[in-house]
Amino acid sequence: MRTLRDRVAVVTGAASGIGRATAVALAERGADVALADIDEVGLQQTARQIEAGGRKATTHTVDVSSKDAMQAFVDEVVDAHGRVHVVINNAGVSVSAPFDEHSLEDFEWLFGVNFWGVVYGCKFFLPHIKAAGEGHIVNISSLFGLIGLPTQSSYAASKFAVRGFSESLRSELQPLRIGVTSVHPGGINTNIVKSSRFTELAPGQKAKIIRSFEKRGWPPELVGKRIIDAIERDRARVLVGPETYVTDLAKRLIPTGTNRIVDRLRKRLGL
């Protein structure tokens, strides 16, 4: 897109982390923002940051895994803002468990948020983006959309799905002046590990991983800035963090020889 000034952007998972950082960055570029999350308190905090900078922010309590809720959300946004140019499908959850201990209910819950939430966001907002004459969709995948690690079967599967979906959608929408970007953050200091459904393989494992993310994780504001750049330059894919670049390069150069990378990532992340 040529400019974000006076455009309308939608951000899911906007109560904290990457969603909040991206929403604030969009507002700093001159956009008004519709914020969605299930955390009402966090949404209000994000909205206050945006409004303090002079832009409009509306808050919407939405479960992105619900088709009906997402359809209603679209109507709310259009009623409040009149139009939509940018959609950031960021809401996500995590389950960490060996596959044989991973319940199907948790698998379905995770896919509902991480994949179907993305599909619903694209499907229901797309007619309004088309009507605006230009726009951009950003779908948040992950480092685990490039490589699968132990205990991450559901999470990696959902993020690989987001990546493939985004690539296909980009090829369809490019002639319509609508960009699509898949974003692959590595270790980012957000709340996703704290709020994850976690099966510990050793006592204190989750707490150890949380401390690792707090100490080594990249700030979510970095991801927000990279997303803004992707929208303005119409980038197909964004990699964030050195481990993501190394993994991507290795997967392309030695696609069947990444066992060592998997082992290093597993140890670094405490999985």
Image (spheres, helix red, strand yellow):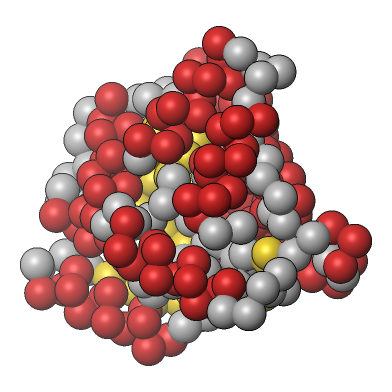
Decide: is 171 above or below 22. above
Q: Quadrant of the N terminus?
A: top left
Q: Is residue 55 left or right of residue 117?
A: left
Quadrant of the rendered structure where residue 48 is? bottom left
Decide: is 93 above or below 257. below
- Near-viewer residue (27 or 239): 239
Q: Percent x, y for residue 89?
A: 51, 52
Kindly tell me whether residue 141 is visible in this rendering. Answer: no
Q: Is residue 26 left or right of residue 93?
A: left
Decide: is 116 above or below 132. below
- The count of marks equals 0
Q: Percent x, y for residue 269?
A: 51, 55
**Residue plotted at (56% across, 32% down):** 261
- Near-viewer residue (13 or 141): 141
Q: Is residue 48 left or right of residue 34?
A: left
Q: Quadrant of the C terminus?
A: bottom right
Query: Which residue lies most toward the left here?
Result: 53
**Residue plotted at (16% across, 65% down):** 55
Q: Percent x, y for residue 208?
A: 48, 71
**Residue plotted at (44% across, 45% down):** 186
